[in-house]
Structures are given as structure tokens and as C-alpha cells.
Amino acid sequence: MAATNNPDLLGTEKISTLLARYAIPAIIAMASSSLYNIIDSIFIGHGVGAMAISGLAVAMPLMNITSALGSMVGIGSSALISIRFGQNRRGETYKILGNLVLLNATIGFVVGLIGLFFLDDILRLFGASEATLPYARSFMRVILCGNVVTHLYMGLNEVLRASGYPRKAMAIMLTSVGLTCLLNPLFIFVLRLGVVGSAIATVIAQCVALSLELYHFSSSSSVLHFRHGIFRFRRRIVGGILSIGIAPFLLHLCASVVVIFVNKALLHTGGDLYVGAYGVVNRVALLFIMIVSGFNQGMQPIVGYNYGAQQYDRVVKTLKLTILCAMSVMTVAFLIGQLMPRYVAMLFVGNADAEAQQLVDVAARGMRIVMMIFPIVGFQIVTSNFFQYINKAPKAIFLSMTRQLIFLVPLLVILPRFMGSDGVWFSMPIADGIASLLAAILLWMQLKQFRREGLQNVGR
């Protein structure tokens, strides 16, 4: 086993070195995935039209919910594996891997089937109009048919990273993103398949990526690999996976619910093009949020291992460094959102007709407002994930719920009545500010607990 693939280094090596080793591949992978969503929208905007972008914006909440279920199992499993490595309970990590495969395959199949059966009703609930429904329906039919592949691909990629192969996890994700970007123009412009072609490209690329992951975990030379007898549901392991993974799932679920509220509010106050404009703003914002998520993924195995080993000083050092990096990234997002939002929005449309120009105007204004306090959003995102990684699921769930539902949804209901579409945009930074303050209070209480427990361990 290569030295850099040894999980025990998580408890001894310099924190900044570890964070760079684990975070940089994750950042590249997550940013590339987000860039794919942006490029995909650009292809669709140029090859199909502005209304197709609105249709894709309506489909995104459903796609995100299905993906979040796969991430729930993957993140829960990887966090549990990191903790077990720190506790030197290696045998149980194989059973966790087997349960991940079974859970993702089962959930992926059931969710895909339900989604296909109720697709039109779900899309209308999410804000589809008669103009945008055909685009959203065509895209999601293909995506849902490949749902099992998506779940397995995402789940195994998380475990690949946690078991000491962050670069391989990055390479596989980059393979998926790169292949999708190559196939997209072929299917959209050459074969003229429109949004269906974009969805087909996504599923094909994920099939290739999953094949590479299965090859890795089938090799006995890998730190963690498939073994005979691990593919059996174990109630205790399933409960542990879901108890940790439920927090990020609820975060994604709440985010999707918020998108539904935003879509409906903008459809009511502005129309279909306002929904498309939010799709543009959301994709740009997600690029930077995904970079922060890359730092979180890099933090996860370091925090999980050292928390399991009761090395709280290393846990806190990792947290502080990750927060600093996240806030720096979100400051860059803030500057772009304030200084050049119109130039960014113009990338998504293929012509200068009135419809396209209206989308650009609305997206530029929305971007300025939504990103106005982004620097502190980086702190809030890292803090929410931190509680998840130290197995404090209730706190992680609470922080996930507050920003997305408890604070934001009421604002989305109230402010548009007085401010129109501006009320929709301003709801987001207001909710971000309140949620960040609450996260700071809970984190301060947790750090005090670490200091107490650290002193107790020294005295033993």
C-alpha cells in the first residue's frame, strides 16, 4: 500500500498537507462537475433556446433530490468508514462498503421508478408551465432511467476518497465530466437531440465512471475492496450510514424545496424567463459552493479519523483552516457577482433577441443580490458539514433546516408580496446572514466542549 493511501497518516501528518492532498482532488472534481452544469446550460441555451434553460431550471430540483439520496448513502458510509479507521476497526469497513452498494442500488431503483411514474405531476409541482414542461420532461425521463447508475457512481466515489484514494476519485469524476462535455455537442448540435441528447450524454458518462469504480473495488490490492459475504443488509450499519448521511440529504432536499418555492415565486412575479434567470444565477453560485464542498470533502476523512482517535486539537485545526479557505473562495464569488454579473449571464444565451436580453438583465440583477454576503456563507456551509463529520447529526440537520426552510421559505412567502421579484432575490442573503449567526453560536459551544474533553484526556 502506498504511503499516501495509508489512512493512519490522517492522525499524524501536517494538517495543511493532508487538507491539500484530500481537498484539491475533490475541489477539481466538484468544480468540474459544476462547470459541466454551466457548460450544459450554455450548450442548451445556444442549441435549443432560452426557454429550454427555463425547462432545465425546473428539472434541476428533481435531479438534485434523486442525486441527494445517492449522496446520503455515500457520505454516510464514507464518514463511518473514516471513523472506523480511526478506531482501528478495519473489518467493519468492508461490511459498510457492501451495505453502501445494496442501499444505493435499492434506493436508486425505487426512486427512479416512482419518479418516472409521477413525472409530469412532480414537474408541475416544481414550477413547470405548459411552455417549460416538455423540456423538463424529456430531460428527466432519461436521467431517471439511469438513476441506479447515478446512485452507485456517487456513493462509491465518496468511499474511494475516504479510503485513501482522493486522486483516483478525482480522476474518475473528471472522466465523467469530460466525457459528458464531449458528448453534449455531438448529441445536441450534430444529432439534434436537444435536451434529450444532453441527458443521454450524462448517463453514458456516469456508466463509464461507475465501471472504473467497480474495477477498483474488485481489486484485492485496494485498501478497501469487495469481499465474499459483505453484501448483506446489516441493521446496525444501515442505521449508522443513514444517521450520518441524513444531514447532507436534508440539506440537498431543503435546497431543492427552496428552488421550488423560488421557481414558483418568480413564475408568479415575473414569468418563465425569470425562472430561467434563477437557473443561471443558481448554476454560477453552485460553482463556488461546489468548490467549498470540495474543501468539506477534503476535511471529512481528516476530521472523522481524528475525532474517532480523540485528537481534538487536530480536529479544530482542520476546521479552522477549512473555514479560512471556504471564506476566501466565497469572497471571489462575491466580487464576481458585484462587478461582472452581466458578462457572466451573457454566456448562457446564443442570440441577442428580446427574450434572451431580458433573461440576461434579470439574471444580472439577481446575481448581485444573491451573492451580496457570500463571504460568510462559506463559514456557514463548512460549519454545517463539520457537525455531520463528528457524528453530531441532530446539529447538522438543524443547521441545514434553518437556512433552507425555517428562515428562507417564510421570507420567500412574505417579501415578494411587497417587493415583487426583488423580494425573492433579497430573501436569500437575509436567510444566509441569520443562519450564519446561528452556526457561529453552535460552533462556539462545540469548541468549548472539545476543550473540556481534551483536558480530561490529558489527565488520564
Image (cartoon, rainbow, N blue to C red):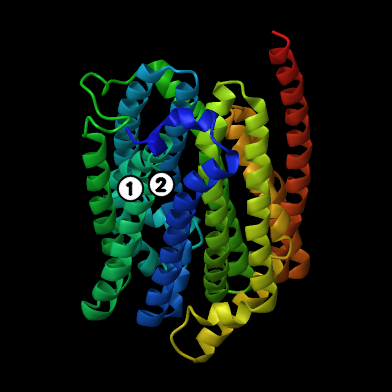
Q: Can residue 193 be seen in this view?
A: no
Q: Residues within 10 Å of mark 1 (few under 14, many from 20)?
A: many
**Which of the pair 163/341 is nearer the observer?**
163
Q: In which quarter of the image is the N terminus?
A: top left
* Residue located 39% across and 81% down the image: 46
Question: Horizontally, is 119 left or right of 31 in the view?
Answer: left
Query: Looking at this view, is 449 or 451 the one in front?
Result: 451
Position in image of residue 154 (x %, y %):
37, 45
Give residue 93's position: percent from left, percent from top. 37, 23
Query: Dots 2 and 1: beta carbons under 8 Å?
Result: yes
Find residue 204 and report its image quarter. bottom left
**Residue hosting label 1:** 150
The alpha-carbon separation of the residues under discs 2 and 1 comes to 9 Å
Q: Is 358 situated above or below 137? A: below
Give the foreground label among 2 and 1.
1
The residue carrying pointer 2 sits among few (fewer than 14), some (14 to 19) or many (20 or more) residues within 10 Å by Cα, namely: many
Q: In this view, does 313 lie above or below 411?
A: above
* Secondary structure at numbered mark 1: helix
| Left or right, residue 423 beside residue 94 | right
SS category of the residue bearing label 2: helix
Q: Which amino acid does label 1 sit on?
A: Thr
User: Badge 2 is on which residue?
Assistant: 66
Q: Quarter of the image containing the C terminus?
A: top right
Quick check: can you spot residue 90? yes
Instruction: Estimate the x, y position of residue 293 in percent, counting from the top left.
Output: 54, 49
